Amino acid sequence: MQAQLTANSEEKLRRRLSTISNLPSPPLVFTQITKVINDPKSSVKDVAAIMSEDAAMSAKVLRLSNSAFYGARSEITGIRQAILVLGLEAVKSLVLSSSVFDMFKSQKLDTDFQEAFWRHSLATALAGRMLIKQHRSLSCYDPEVAFSAGLLHDIGKLIICCFMPEDHKRIKQQLQEQRLADYQAEESVIGYAHTLIGRMLAQNWKLPASIQEAIEFHHSPVAPGGEDSTYSCVIHVADYLARLTFEKKLPEIEGWSYLLPEIREYLGLTTEVTDALSHRLLEEYSCSSTFIQMALSA
C-alpha cells in the first residue's frame, strides 16, 4: 500500500505542482456545467444554453453521444436531445472526457506511454461503469461517476510523464531494474505516488469528493460503506479487470491477483464472475472506438 502524505510532504507536493506554469485546468464550460448540474433548481434548458456557447465542445459531445458505446436508437442532433436521451450525468461525463483529452493534446512526450495510458484509463472507466450497471448491490450508485473516476484514476501518471519528464524517465528505469509497483517507484524517485498527485489535481479542478477519493485510494480502498469509499472499491476492481482483460499476465508485486478479501466477498468476485466480466469488458471496449480516437488524436 502506498504511504499517506504527511502535512509537510503534502505541502511540498502542492508547491511542486504550483511551479508547473502550464498545468492543465478544465475549460470554462466544464466548470459552468458542473455548477449548473449540481444546482437542484437547474434545468435541461440551462445546461443546453451553456453548451451552446462552446461550439467545439458541443460537437465533441454530440460525436460521443452518437457513438456505438451509448447505442442511441436514433441520431442525436442537439445537446438538449443528448441530455434528454442520455441524462445529465452522462453529458457531464462526456464533457469531462473531451475536456481532459483536450487538456493534454499538446503534450507529445513518450507517446507510447501516453497511448497505453489512455487505453488503460478508458478500459478502467468502462469497467467501472459496467460494474455499477450490472451489480445489484451497486444499483444506487451512478455509473457515469464511476466512468469519470475510472478515466481519471491514473491521471497523476500523466502529470509525471508530461510535466516531470526527468522524474518519469527515472521511474521507468527503476521499474525496469527492480521488482516494484508503479507507486513504489514513484515514491522512491519523487516522494509521492501518482494517486496523490491525481487527487490534488482533482481538487484543483473542483471534481466531486467521490472522484477525488477513487483517484487517491484505488490501490488501497477501505471496505464499501459510504458513497465515496464505494466508488474507490469499484475503481479498485475496475482497474484489476482492465489489467486482467488486456494485459493478461498480472504482476504479483502490484497485488492484482489479491483483490481485498472484503471487496471480493462484497461483490461476489469468483474466478467465474471475473472471467464473465472480462468478456463483457471486451465487448464494451469494442464499442468505444470514438473515445479511443478522440483520446489518441488529442
Image (tube, rainbow, N blue to C red):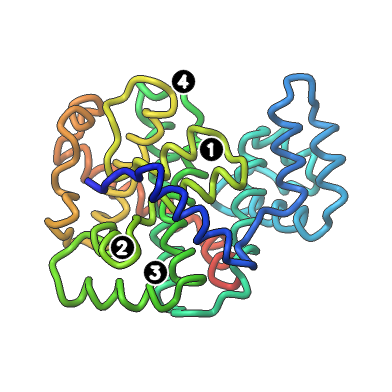
Within the image, what quadrant is residue 154 found in? bottom left
Residue under the point 73% across and 32% down: 84
How many C-alpha atoms fall within 10 Å of the one at disc 4: few (<14), some, or many (≥20)?
few
For the residues marked 1 and 3, what is the alpha-carbon distance in whole angstroms? 22 Å
How many C-alpha atoms fall within 10 Å of the one at disc 1: few (<14), some, or many (≥20)?
many
N-terminal label among 1 and 2 = 1
For the residues marked 2 and 4, what is the alpha-carbon distance in whole angstroms? 35 Å
Q: Determine contact: label 3, label 4, CB under 8 Å.
A: no
Q: Is mark 2 on a helix, strand or loop?
A: helix
N-terminal label among 2 and 4 = 4
Front residue of 149 and 269: 149
Q: Residue 116 carries which label?
A: 3
Amino acid on which disc 1 is placed: Glu
N-terminal label among 3 and 2 = 3
Seen in the image, is 5 located left or right of residue 244? right
Residue under the point 47% across and 46% down: 199
Q: Which of marks 2 and 4 is in front?
A: 2
State the residue position of label 4.
140
Q: Determine contact: label 3, label 2, CB under 8 Å.
A: no
N-terminal label among 1 and 3 = 3
Viewport quadrant of the C terminus: bottom right
For the residues marked 3 and 2, what is the alpha-carbon distance in whole angstroms? 18 Å
State the residue position of label 1.
144
Amino acid on which disc 3 is placed: Ala
For the residues marked 3 and 4, what is the alpha-carbon distance in whole angstroms? 32 Å
For the residues marked 1 and 2, what is the alpha-carbon distance in whole angstroms? 29 Å
How many C-alpha atoms fall within 10 Å of the one at disc 3: few (<14), some, or many (≥20)?
few
Amino acid on which disc 2 is placed: Glu
State the residue position of label 2.
186
Q: Which of marks 1 and 2 is in front?
A: 2
Seen in the image, is 95 located left or right of residue 156? right
Q: Nearer the viewer, mark 3 or mark 2?
A: 2
